Image: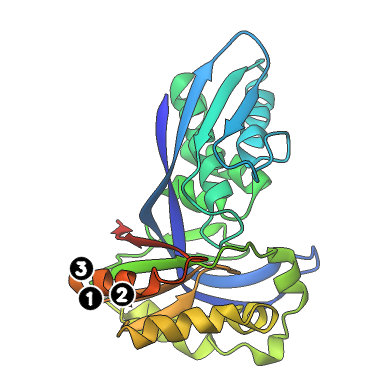
């Protein structure tokens, strides 16, 4: 099986507070974008194994794709062995959900292969055991997510922009970002009501309560934002807990012009993508 496993961006992320279990309650608008890891899944009689083109990615039980195989196997009560190879295009630790997307792709692929033994609700519940973003990638539509990100409501997203993503070349620990979050400094709450009412997403609604935390730890976040705005982006935002920053551009030409300038920074990886509806 060959599967295209997409990245996501958070167009909006408001943190409401910390729960007794240590997770944080959030309100976020997410959409998948046309940046993909390519996953090759081959069924075998041996042991499950994983290889990856990115040598920084763990290929053992720490990898979300392996966790997905083991979880599905346990729920199905059947010994499943697969060889997985990931052509890694989505940067790791970048706030783009690559690992969660890979897990969702594996769960979906296994469910198809074995004749849909589980409903989509059951598969999404499995995904939540692996990570808070996994259900979103199984939901497979732009969504307003609440709770820890697992309560999903379809959002009829109209995004009349090209998205230019800049990965600065370093990863960020989500746990460290949340650990340093001061809830008194979050400021996205006021925009959430407007977000719910909007028919077409406006770049002025971009908001991320985690951005100031990550930017205080990694000042290059603000450097990228300034560079994107200088190239006439309609709006800029860090995705998730970082480290990637994206700009919304009104058309392909303006995005291409920005790429030409920003590519002069050799430490940055740049992707021009579309939202996937």
What whole-number distance in Å separates the C-alpha atoms at marks 2 and 1? 6 Å
Which residue occupies the foreground of this view, 23 or 272? 272
Above or below for 263 versus 8? below
Q: Position of residue 99 (x, y in %)?
A: 58, 47
Q: Can residue 115 be seen?
A: no
Question: What is the basis of the colouring in this image?
Answer: rainbow
For mark 3, what is the residue? Answer: 252
Residue 210 point in image, percent of width and height: 61, 78
Q: Count residues near mark 1 (Cα–Cα under 10 Å), then give few for <14, some for 14-19, many for 20+.
A: some
Question: Front-most of 63 and 76?
Answer: 63
Mark 1 lies on residue: 254
Contact, CB < 8 Å: mark 1 with mark 3?
yes
| Secondary structure category for the residue under label 1 | helix
Q: Secondary structure at mark 3?
A: helix
Marking on residue 258: 2
Where, by quadrant of the figure, is residue 54 drawn? top right
Question: Which corner quadrant holds the C terminus?
Answer: bottom left
**10 Å crowding of disc 2: few (<14), some (14-19), many (20+):** many
Q: Is residue 213 above or below residue 175?
A: below
Counting from the top left corner in percent of width and height, residue 191 is at 45, 87
The local secondary structure at tag 2 comes to helix
Q: Nearer the viewer, residue 13 or 149?
A: 13
Disc 3 and disc 2: Cα gap in Å?
A: 10 Å
Q: Quadrant of residue 37?
A: top left
Q: Are marks 2 and 1 in contact (CB under 8 Å)?
A: yes
Q: Residue at x 57, y 57 (%)?
A: 150
């Amino acid at each position: 099986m060959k599967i295209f496993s997409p990245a996501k961006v958070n167009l909006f992320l408001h943190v409401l507070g910390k729960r007794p279990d240590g997770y944080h309650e959030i309100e976020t608008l997410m959409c998948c974008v046309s940046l993909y890891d390519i996953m090759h899944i081959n069924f075998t009689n041996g042991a499950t194994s994983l290889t990856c083109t990115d040598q920084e990615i763990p290929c053992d039980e720490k990898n979300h794709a392996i966790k997905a195989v083991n979880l599905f196997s346990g729920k199905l009560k059947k010994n499943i062995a697969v060889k997985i190879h990931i052509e890694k295009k989505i940067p790791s630790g970048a706030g783009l959900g690559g690992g969660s997307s890979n897990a969702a792709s594996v769960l979906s692929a296994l469910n198809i292969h074995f004749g849909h033994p589980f409903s989509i609700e059951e598969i999404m519940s499995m995904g939540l055991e692996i990570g808070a973003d996994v259900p979103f990638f199984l939901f497979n539509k732009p969504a307003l997510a609440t709770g820890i990100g697992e309560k999903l409501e379809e959002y009829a997203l109209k995004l009349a922009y090209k998205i230019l993503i800049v990965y600065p070349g370093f990863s960020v620990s989500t746990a460290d970002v949340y650990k340093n979050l001061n809830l008194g400094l979050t400021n996205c709450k006021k925009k959430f009501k407007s977000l719910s009412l909007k028919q077409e997403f406006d770049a002025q609604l971009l908001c991320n309560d985690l951005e100031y935390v990550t930017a205080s730890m990694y000042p290059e976040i603000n450097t990228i934002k300034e560079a994107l705005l200088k190239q006439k982006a309609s709006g800029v935002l860090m995705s998730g807990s970082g480290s990637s920053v994206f700009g919304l551009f009104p058309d392909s030409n303006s995005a291409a012009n920005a790429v030409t300038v920003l590519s002069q920074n050799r430490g940055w990886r740049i992707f021009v993508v579309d939202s996937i509806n």
